[in-house]
Image: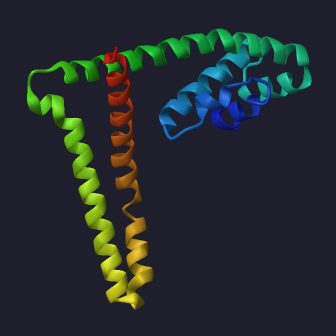
Amino acid sequence: MDPITIALGLAQFVPGLIRWIGGEDAEKAAKVADQVVGVARTVTGKSGGEDALAAVKADPALALQLQQAWMAHEIELSREETRQLAEINATMRAEAASEDNYVRRWRPTFGYAVALTWTATMGAVSWAIITEPAQAPSIIAALVNTSPIWGIALGVLGVAVVKRSQDKALRQP
């Protein structure tokens, strides 16, 4: 069994584990899965992940020990995540405080560019479907293929808007 499958099996005993192995970052999920399997192997004294999972399933005391050991490890994961977020926040604050108009205004400019592009795309798709209804399925299929691009752009825009709103809220008296 691969580490992620074993970690998912251990998740029934470790509240909050899914938070660390879920999501879209497969590399991070694999890293955390390896870590939780390592913690389980340490707690159970077993050499393999599957054996550790079986031992935890069979012994409620081991499940409790696993929970306690994982909580200690989770504190370190949270500290690392907090450090990364602080670094991102510091970068955003430096951009907002910059005297350079381009650096200070890139987020709003990006927002307007995304909105304009979205509007143009949806207008063109609507026009194409209205004028060529027979082509609607292929047009919609082509539009679906742009989902990853829009997902990234809208994700970046979402972070920019939320963080900018938080920065503005902190400045108000």
Q: Nearer the viewer, residue 114 or 27?
A: 114
Residue 46 falls left or right of residue 80: right
Q: Nearer the viewer, residue 94 or 21?
A: 94
Q: Nearer the viewer, residue 139 or 24?
A: 139
In the rendering, at what x and y percent does residue 29 appear?
55, 32
Identify the residue shown where x is 22% and y is 18%. 94
Residue 141 falls left or right of residue 59: left
Report which quarter residue 55 is drawn in.
top right
Q: Is residue 100 visible?
A: yes
Q: Quadrant of the N terminus?
A: top right
Report which quarter residue 136 is drawn in.
bottom left
Identify the residue shown where x is 32% and y is 24%. 168
Report which quarter residue 31 is drawn in.
top right
Identify the residue shown where x is 39% and y is 65%. 145
Q: Is residue 17 above or below residue 141?
A: above
Q: Quadrant of the C terminus?
A: top left
In the rendering, at what x and y percent does residue 158 appear?
38, 40
